[in-house]
Image (tube, grey):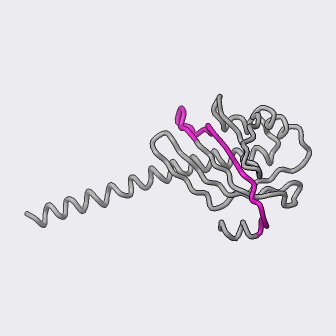
Amino acid sequence: MKKKVACILTTLFCTNVPAQTNVETAETASIHKAIDNTFDAMRNHNGKKFLAQFTQQAILERANINNEIETLSLNKFSEFINSTKKHLDEQTFDIKINISGNLASAWVPFVFYLDGRLSHCGVNSFQLIKQQEQWKVRYLIDNGYVGDCEVFIEQHK
């Protein structure tokens, strides 16, 4: 009897673990898509697509070198994306995502290239919410790394 119970419990445990992993993988992929869409919109000068990644009341901020918080207008940034002739290319790597139900956070190290030249690097912190089966950015804050971006890249790979 003990062997049957152990066998049943083992079977249940083994079949539940992959299902949970697949759900988390699908959610993580959806969050990656929202983040990728944000930066693809910048590369493609598509302010509308950029704004579509955010909730209605989303906040965009930067923690500057003086440890002050600068609030940026999403609409003005979207207009800049549409109008600039410069190539905006934010490359991300080593993204770490945490999910709890309809909330997620993403720690996103980046290197930003302007017209193909390294401009700056740092970290984006995304706070996302799942609305109508789609992950949207509710809050995005970034900072700029003070130092050599090549060192930053090596530290975060």
Which part of the image, by quadrant, shows the N terminus? bottom left
Image check: 138 left or right of 11? Answer: right
97 vs 59: above or below: below
Image check: 92 left or right of 89? Answer: left
Residue placed farthest to the right in the image? 85
Instruction: Please state the extent of the stretch shown in magenta in the rendering.
Output: 128-150
Where does residue 68 sit, x and y in percent of width and height? 73, 45
Residue sitting at x 44%, y 53%:
22
Residue sitting at x 38%, y 57%:
18
90 vs 104: above or below: below
Where does residue 157 sit, x and y in percent of width and height? 65, 68
Indicate yes or no whether the magenta region holds residue 8.
Answer: no
Indicate yes or no whether the magenta region holds residue 147.
Answer: yes
Q: In terms of depth relative to the viewer, which is nearer, 150 or 11?
A: 150
Residue placed farthest to the left in the image? 1
Q: In terms of depth relative to the viewer, which is nearer, 114 or 133?
A: 114
Residue placed farthest to the top in the image? 56
| Count of numbered marks | 0
Where does residue 35 sit, x and y in percent of width and height? 65, 47
Which picture quadrant has residue 16? bottom left
Query: Which SS type dominates the magenta stretch?
Result: strand
Residue sitting at x 74%, y 37%:
71
Where does residue 45 sit, x and y in percent of width and height? 82, 42
Image check: 82 left or right of 109? Answer: right
109 vs 86: above or below: below
Which picture quadrant has residue 110? bottom right
Residue sitting at x 70%, y 49%:
142
